[in-house]
Amino acid sequence: MKTHTIKNKTKQAPMVFDMTSNQCVWSRAGIMSPFPCMNAFNCFDCPLDKKMQERVQSKQMHRHPAWRNHLPHTSEPVITGTDTKCRHMLSGRVAYKYCIHNYDCATCAYHQLMEEETISLAVSHVNKEYAGGFSLAQRYYYHRGHTWARIEYGGRVRLGLDDFATKLLGPMDLPDLPALGTAVQQGEPGIGIARDELKAEALYPMEGIVVAINPTIRQKGMVNKDPYGEGWLMIIEPTKLKMNLKNLIFGEESIAWMEEESSRLAALVSQETEYKLAATGGRAVNDIYGQIPELGWDTLVKSFLLTP
């Protein structure tokens, strides 16, 4: 069967989910010309932010008309009154919030609240589109092993299985997930999947450190019911965000890729059985392996989850 290589056109700046602005906080403060955030609003690990801080500390920017009222994260006691916009206001995360903590975000209770909100943020309202009978969540990044990554505010990344994987393998038992603090590698197996006595491992779409596990994932069938929303698996602190994104599929490329995957599956079904998948524009059944077990569990796992 002939396959097609999909050209990856992932943009250099990561697409942060559900943000109304992609402008760097320094741009939003009016200190520099419009420039997109390149680090998912993780200012504390941003080379540009560090460089700008050095300029502030060396007194190079003290004459700038905007710096005193809007400048992010300087250790200098520059706050006068309540006219200094909070970093979360500058990033567009919140509409109105002024800093009363001298940009000492590391010890700021409000900043900690925003961090915790990112982890517990409801993901039930996800816009989807269909390709080859399977759904894709918009503005998510996809690994070719049918896992997804959703870049969130502050640079953390939420991970899960896509609709294709959950429909292909059918009802899953409780996923076997790594412990908090575990270092995971992009493209390496480690997301444990089980269906009765059948086992499989999905590949991690991103590299990083596990910082949260979905507390509701123990509800049986949650992954299958809502793979892009309440069925998310874990959140990681990425260690190679931009580098990893170059290996993932996004936007229009994900539509083309899913249609190709659906075609590959249809060819396998036709080869092994007399069955046919849903026609173009239709939606795939919820348990493909359960309805066509002769396809073989191991064959499906190796062919589509890309694990040995």
Image (spheres, rainbow, N blue to C red):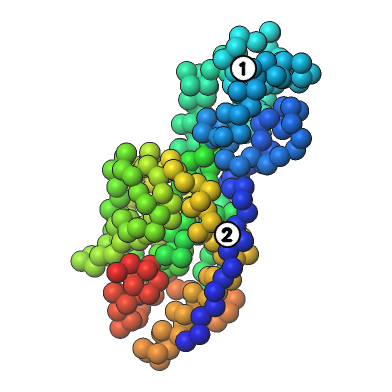
Alpha carbon separation for disc pair 2 and 1:
39 Å
Secondary structure found at label 1: helix
Residue 256 vs 141, above or below: the answer is below
Q: Which residue is mark 2?
A: 250
Labels 2 and 1: the sequence-earlier one: 1
Residue 57 numbered tag: 1
Looking at the rendering, which quadrant does residue 191 occupy?
Answer: bottom left
Crowding near the residue tagged with mark 1, few <14, some 14–19, many ≥20 C-alpha atoms within 10 Å: few
Residue drawn at 57 percent across, 28 percent down: 50
Q: Taking the image as drawn, is residue 129 in sight?
A: no
> Looking at the image, how many numbered discs can be counted on the residues?
2
Residue 90 vs 261, above or below: the answer is above
Kindly check if marks 2 and 1 are in contact, taking CB atoms under 8 A apart as contact: no
Q: Amino acid at mark 2?
A: Phe
Q: Nearer the viewer, residue 244 or 304?
A: 244
Secondary structure found at label 2: strand
Q: Amino acid at mark 1?
A: Gln
x, y (%) of residue 279?
55, 82
x, y (%) of residue 181?
32, 39
